[in-house]
Image (cartoon, helix red, strand yellow):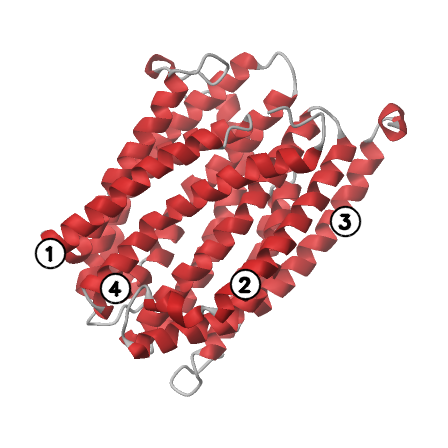
């Protein structure tokens, strides 16, 4: 896809919609786990799987964040000319980092899983099941990393359709294995974790096969797997701040999970179901974050600044329309949606209460996410990290610190989400306005006249 010429809206949608579907399918990995154990193993198993999500995200977000660096660096090279060798080096460096880093991270996660469950004060009736699930899940970390890095490289050249096909295949396998392991073999949470890592292994193999058959700059070969220091530094400059930002989100969510766990397992199960539903809203809007980031990166490389500004406006508009529509729908159908996960009336009520408190404001987070993509794509990776540290992590930690969960309703814990999103969006908007002014000053006279 040529992101530097031609009409923008059609290309943004052509890029974003397959990516949105891919992200939704990837999210279905964890959702299938939650639905299957919630329906056929009980609310304790549902709480065990759901309560580990914040821990898993905290541990893997740093390495997954480097996939942002892969996307931005390769997209910028593609926007320039004569950078074929640099693109190949960046690709092979990223995949080697994914294999080695994912293996080390997975082993570390297995060894530290007990300590991490203590960190979030997992309820006694949930902890043994959560420990089994998280240990098996971490074994699949290398597969997750390889897929994310390979898919990031494909997105850099505008290919979001093949990753969609790969995730469709692996997602179907994941669902079939979930049902077989839990219903037929009665493996409970161990079955859904095993199904997840098998399907992740398949998606990693498919993306590597796709790159190996490529005829262009993104052709993959095991013989070329080595770390290029220049490529690693370029990707780390963007990717590590992105990973740290993800870790900050997860760290604040770990604190919130600890507060939630001070209530009973019914509330934890409802929280898990509600959070899983909300993730679909975020993943949908997040496609426009990636579109904004990739389009701005390529156009920055091509020095087409006006297209950068138009890209940001269009991605914000698309996010607003989608976010408002889906938030309204989920709020109206909150109870039926939660009942998909568990049919216990108490769990349904607990999940619906979370949705009604958080979901109406989710579009604010979507807008903030697009602004992060714009700022990163324009070469300022550290700004969003500092803003997230203050507006999200610190604010939420202070919020939870001053709450007495033995007295207040759980809705007070949930309210920390929309409050922190509003502060985050305002701060990012101010930062983007300053960045936009700086980019305008860099425009050449010839481009000003276009």
Q: Residues within 10 Å of mark 3 (few under 14, many from 20)?
A: few
Rendering coords of residue 11 (x, y %)? 63, 33
Question: Callout 4: few (<14), some (14-19), or many (20+) C-alpha neighbours within 10 Å?
Answer: many
Confirm whether residue 97 shows in the render: yes
Report the residue marked by disc 1: 186
Q: Which residue is mark 4?
A: 38
Picture quadrant of residue 289: top right
The CA distance from mark 3 to mark 2 is 27 Å
Q: Which residue is mark 2?
A: 327
Mark closer to the observer (3, 1): 1
Tell which of 326 and 151 is nearer to you: 326
Alpha-carbon distance for marks 2 and 4?
A: 24 Å
Q: How far is disc 3 from disc 4 in space, using C-alphas?
A: 46 Å
Q: Say what secondary structure mark 2 lies in.
A: helix
Closest to the observer, 13 or 283: 13
Circles 3, 1 touching at the beta carbon (< 8 Å):
no
Along the polypeptide, which appears first: circle 2 or circle 4? 4
Q: Taking the image as drawn, is residue 378 in sight?
A: no
Q: SS for tag 4?
A: helix
- The residue lying at 45 percent from left, 51 percent from top is 247
Asked if labels 1 and 2 touch by Cβ distance under 8 angstroms, the answer is no
Q: CA distance from mark 1 to mark 4?
A: 13 Å
At mark 1, the secondary structure is loop
- Judging by the rendered image, the residue that carries numbered circle 3 is 433
Given contact means CB atoms under 8 Å apart, are the residues at marks 3 and 4 in contact? no
Q: Is residue 233 left or right of residue 162?
A: right
Q: Earlier in the sequence, mark 3 or mark 1?
A: 1
């Amino acid at each position: 896809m040529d992101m530097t010429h031609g009409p923008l809206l059609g290309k943004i949608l052509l890029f974003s919609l397959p990516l949105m579907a891919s992200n939704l399918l990837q999210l279905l990995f964890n959702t299938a786990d939650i639905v299957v154990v919630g329906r056929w193993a009980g609310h304790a198993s549902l709480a065990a799987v759901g309560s580990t999500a914040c821990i898993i995200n905290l541990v893997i977000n740093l390495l997954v964040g480097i996939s942002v660096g892969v996307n931005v660096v390769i997209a910028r090279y593609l926007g320039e000319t004569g950078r074929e060798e640099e693109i190949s080096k960046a690709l092979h460096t990223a995949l080697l980092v994914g294999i080695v880093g994912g293996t080390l991270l997975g082993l570390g996660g297995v060894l530290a899983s007990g300590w991490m469950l203590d960190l979030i004060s997992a309820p006694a009736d949930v902890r043994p099941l959560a420990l089994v699930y998280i240990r098996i899940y971490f074994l699949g970390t290398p597969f997750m990393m390889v897929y994310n890095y390979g898919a990031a490289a494909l997105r850099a050249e505008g290919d979001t359709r093949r990753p969609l096909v790969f995730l469709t295949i692996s997602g179907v396998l994941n669902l079939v294995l979930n049902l077989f392991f839990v219903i037929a073999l009665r493996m409970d949470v161990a079955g859904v974790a095993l199904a997840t890592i098998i399907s992740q292994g398949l998606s990693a193999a498919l993306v590597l096969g796709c790159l190996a058959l490529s005829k262009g700059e993104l052709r993959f070969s095991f013989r070329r797997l080595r770390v290029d220091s220049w490529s690693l530094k370029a990707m780390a400059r963007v990717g590590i701040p992105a990973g740290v930002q993800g870790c900050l989100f997860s760290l604040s969510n770990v604190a919130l999970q600890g507060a939630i766990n001070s209530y009973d397992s019914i509330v934890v199960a409802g929280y898990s179901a509600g959070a899983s539903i909300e993730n679909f809203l975020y993943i949908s809007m997040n496609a426009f974050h990636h579109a904004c980031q990739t389009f701005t990166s390529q156009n920055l490389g091509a020095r087409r600044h006006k297209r950068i500004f138009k890209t940001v406006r269009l991605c914000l508009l698309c996010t607003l329309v989608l976010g408002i529509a889906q938030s309204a729908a989920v709020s109206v159908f909150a109870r039926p949606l939660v009942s998909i996960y568990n049919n216990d009336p108490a769990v349904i009520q607990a999940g619906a209460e979370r949705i009604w408190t958080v979901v109406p404001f989710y579009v604010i987070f979507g807008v903030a996410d697009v602004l992060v993509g714009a700022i990163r794509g324009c070469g300022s990776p550290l700004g969003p990290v500092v803003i997230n540290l203050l507006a999200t992590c610190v604010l939420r930690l202070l919020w939870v610190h001053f709450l007495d969960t033995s007295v207040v309703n759980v809705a007070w814990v949930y309210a920390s989400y929309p409050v922190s999103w509003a502060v985050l969006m305002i701060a990012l908007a101010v930062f983007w306005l300053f960045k936009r002014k700086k980019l305008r000053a860099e425009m050449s006279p010839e481009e000003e006249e276009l």
